[in-house]
Image (cartoon, grey):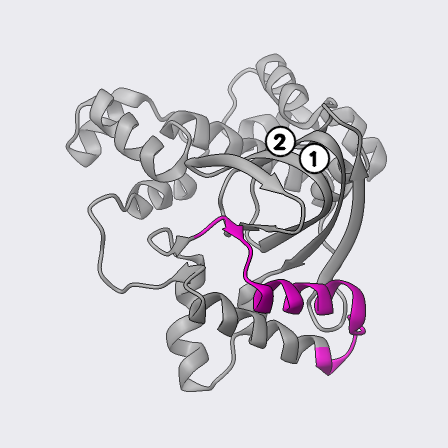
């Protein structure tokens, strides 16, 4: 539950906007439940073996390799053997600046159409990850410099492939609609009609790109928004449920408990 607690706690970055955590899990235990966030997360497996889901992809993370989790990608990991790993987190938006290369390239890192290779074994990249996790002071300019170096390596080694062309499988217009209207009553029929697809085709297209059906994506997004409201406000749980798109507070509580492992009241007490 240690990783779960940190995953559900708003990230308190260092002065240089980098966060590093170290974890271990016994075999057959969930490292963390399916969730997503706006930051880039890199998990370097120092020992053990783990299975993962990341967006529309799944596989095995082996000792000595890293899992690259893009922003907004739903991800889950489970220990197959006893595991020990470092977790590196940063929000690429914190590293925007006025240089032309940063203005033109970095915003693409958080776009739905950008391609990420989930498993990384590049010695150069792993060395940079290790430096950020274990060698440089997180509060130093050295760590800022190393983040830019890491981003450069991720592009150079084609772990991240940025393209300005809109791909046929791109569903960013659908995710944007869901996120902008998450509090509304959205049905599969309404969604398919709005975007000109049959319900089956829309579901298949969305799942191929994101790894989840659109209404499942919407439900998790609503729950994440509800979690933020619990952490940041004193609103009654019933009001939070309504503001998050749930008409039935009891159904909201069941969904929230299933997703986060504890009912809303647990996190309100934590606050």
**Residue located at (42% from left, 42% from top):** 179
Q: How many residues crowd around disc 1 within 10 Å: few (fewer than 14), some, or many (20 or more)?
A: few
Q: Residue at 36% across / 42% down in the picture?
A: 175
Residue 233 visible at all: no
Give the quarter of the image for residue 111: bottom left
Q: Mark 1 points at which residue?
A: 235
Q: What residue sits right under mark 2 in the picture?
A: 240
Q: So how many labels did they put on this image?
A: 2
Looking at this rendering, what residue extends furthest in the bottom direction?
Answer: 99
Image position, residue 134 (x, y; %):
79, 65
**Image vertical order of residue 112 relative to residue 151, above or below:** above
Whether residue 30 is visible, yes or no, is: yes
Report the residue at 20% width, 33% height from top.
Answer: 194
189 sits left or right of 83 in the view? left
Report crowding for label 2: few under 14, some 14 to 19, many 20 or more residues within 10 A (C-alpha).
Answer: many
- Please name whichever residue, 244 or 122, is drawn nearer the observer in this view of the structure: 122
238 or 199: which is nearer to us? 199
Q: In this view, does 237 lie above or below 176?
A: above
Q: Give the range drawn in magenta.
A: 117-142
Quadrant showing the N terminus: top right
Q: Which mark is residue 21?
A: none
The image shows residue 107 at horizontal and vertical percentages of 42, 67
Decide: is 110 above or below 85: below
Q: Identify which residue, 24 or 216, lies in the foreground.
A: 24
Question: Which quadrant: the C terminus?
Answer: top right
Circles 2 and 1: CB atoms closer than 8 Å: yes
Secondary structure, mark 2, is helix
């Amino acid at each position: 539950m240690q990783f779960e607690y940190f995953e559900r706690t708003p990230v308190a970055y260092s002065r240089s906007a980098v966060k590093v955590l170290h974890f271990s899990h016994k075999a057959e235990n969930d490292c963390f439940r399916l969730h997503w966030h706006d930051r880039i997360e890199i998990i370097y497996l120092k020992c053990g073996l783990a299975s993962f889901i990341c967006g529309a992809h799944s596989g095995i993370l082996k000792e000595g390799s890293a899992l690259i989790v893009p922003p907004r990608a739903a991800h889950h990991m489970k220990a197959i053997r006893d595991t020990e790993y470092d977790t590196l987190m940063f929000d690429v938006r914190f590293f925007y600046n006025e240089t032309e290369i940063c203005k033109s390239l970095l915003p693409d890192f958080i776009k739905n159409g950008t391609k990420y290779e989930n498993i990384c074994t590049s010695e150069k990249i792993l060395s940079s990850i290790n430096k950020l996790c274990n060698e440089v002071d997180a509060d130093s300019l050295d760590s800022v410099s190393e983040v830019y170096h890491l981003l450069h390596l991720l592009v150079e080694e084609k772990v991240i492939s940025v393209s300005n062309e809109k791909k046929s499988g791109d569903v960013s217009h659908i995710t944007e609609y869901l996120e902008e209207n998450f509090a509304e009553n959205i049905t599969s029929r309404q969604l398919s009609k709005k975007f000109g697809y049959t319900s089956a085709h829309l579901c298949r297209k969305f799942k191929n790109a994101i790894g989840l059906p659109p209404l499942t994506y919407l439900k998790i997004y609503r729950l994440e928004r509800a979690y933020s409201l619990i952490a940041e406000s004193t609103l009654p749980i019933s009001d939070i449920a309504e503001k998050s798109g749930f008409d039935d507070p009891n159904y909201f509580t069941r969904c929230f408990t299933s997703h986060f492992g504890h009912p809303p009241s647990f996190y309100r007490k934590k606050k």
